Amino acid sequence: MKKKLVKQTIKRITRIAKKWMKPMGLLWWRTDFVYFTDKKTIKEHLEANPGFVCLMKAWADWKYMEATVEFNLPALAEQSDSKIEEALVHEFTHILVREMREGDLHHEERVVSTLVRAFFWNGGSKL
């Protein structure tokens, strides 16, 4: 991935993150962003299921209000701002609800997906 494209993609992510961190109450969290460009590292960190690699993934230690969001820059470079925004709000929501996770991730995914739709809903428009 070319350096210019890396910088442009990080700039897009940062702009969108700044839009949402305050209204979602994440400014008092310590949140680190980690950007990956190497295919092997991306697969190690962001492969959710065999053959499916995420655009991004959040990790949260709710006890200390610390979180990390990892980004798949090559995949994100190909996405629209609205797709990046939706995915980022989704991961930010995982940070907020991590404390309630019990067992597997299925229930949390459903709650997060529902909340993200509610955040973006404006009189019936679809994501």
Image (tube, rainbow, N blue to C red):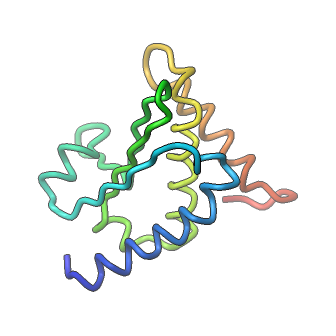
State the residue in front, 59 or 124. 59
Q: Quadrant of the N terminus?
A: bottom left
In the picture provided, is 2 more to the left or to the right than 122?
left
State the residue in front, 72 or 79. 72
In the current view of this chain or complex, which residue is farthest to the left? Answer: 40
117 to 100, vertically: above or below = below
In the picture provided, is 68 more to the left or to the right than 111?
left
Residue 14, given in percent of the width and then of the height, sits at 47, 68
**Residue at 50% from the left image edge and 14% from the top image edge:** 102
**Residue at 18% from the left image edge and 43% from the top image edge:** 44
Q: Quadrant of the C terminus?
A: bottom right
In the current view of this chain or complex, which residue is farthest to the top? Answer: 103
For residue 104, which quarter of the picture? top left
Residue 105, given in percent of the width and then of the height, sits at 45, 25
Q: How many marks?
A: 0
28 to 64, vertically: above or below = below
For residue 11, which quarter of the picture? bottom left
In the current view of this chain or complex, which residue is farthest to the bottom? Answer: 4
**Residue at 22% from the left image edge and 81% from the top image edge:** 3
113 to 74, vertically: above or below = above
Residue 59, given in percent of the width and then of the height, sits at 39, 37
Residue 109, given in percent of the width and then of the height, sits at 53, 33
57 to 126, vertically: above or below = above
**Residue at 47% from the left image edge and 74% from the top image edge:** 12
